[in-house]
Image: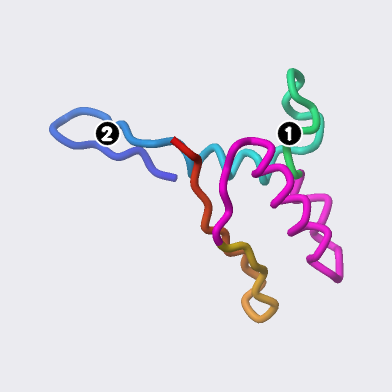
Amino acid sequence: MEVQIANNDVVIGTSDAQHQLLLLLVAKGGFKESPTATVGAQNYLESEDPADFLREVRLRFSHDGCNISDLNFDDNTKRLNISASYAN
């Protein structure tokens, strides 16, 4: 993520994408006030079947109030695709 500058000032926008990235990457227990809130994606790196990982992503995002409209793992490109938003 890059800092955007316009008119000699920092552009402020929504932080949804950054928050979702933190939920994915922070290890379990990484948020001391809510130790089970995160996915801890690094724990799934050597997994042969992404089903457990996708289930955990869906569970943690929904507990955080995020609505997932599309979630899949592309075996060919090894990319995680998430389309999700927070209810306003």
Tell me the crowding category of disc 1: few under 14, some 14 to 19, or many 20 or more residues within 10 angstroms, Cα based.
many
Left-right relation of 35 to 1:
right
- Location of residue 60 in the rendering, given as x and y in whole percent from the top left corner: 71, 42
Q: Residue furthest left?
A: 7
Q: Is residue 58 magenta?
A: yes
Residue 37 on image: x %, y %: 73, 33
Given residues 88 and 81, the one toward you in this image is: 88
Asked if residue 8 is positioned above or below residue 27 in the image, the reply reads above
The numbered dot on residue 37 is 1
Secondary structure under badge 1?
A: loop
Q: Quadrant of the N terminus?
A: top left
Write the residue at 24% across / 36% down: 5
Question: Tag 2's secondary structure?
Answer: loop
Residue furthest top as drawn: 33
- Lateral position of residue 32 relative to residue 76, left or right: right
Type of amino acid at the residue the image marks with label 1? Ala
Q: Nearer the viewer, residue 9 or 44?
A: 44
What residue do we see at 75% from left, 29% from top? Answer: 30
Return the residue nearer the eye: 65 or 39.
Answer: 65
* Residue stretch rendered in magenta on the structure: 40-69
The disc, 2 or 1, on the residue closer to the chain's N-terminal end is: 2
**Nearest to the observer: residue 41 or residue 84:** 84
Which quadrant holds the C terminus? top left
Q: Amino acid at mark 2?
A: Val
Q: Residue at x 79, y 27 (%)?
A: 35
Residue at the disc numbered 2: 11
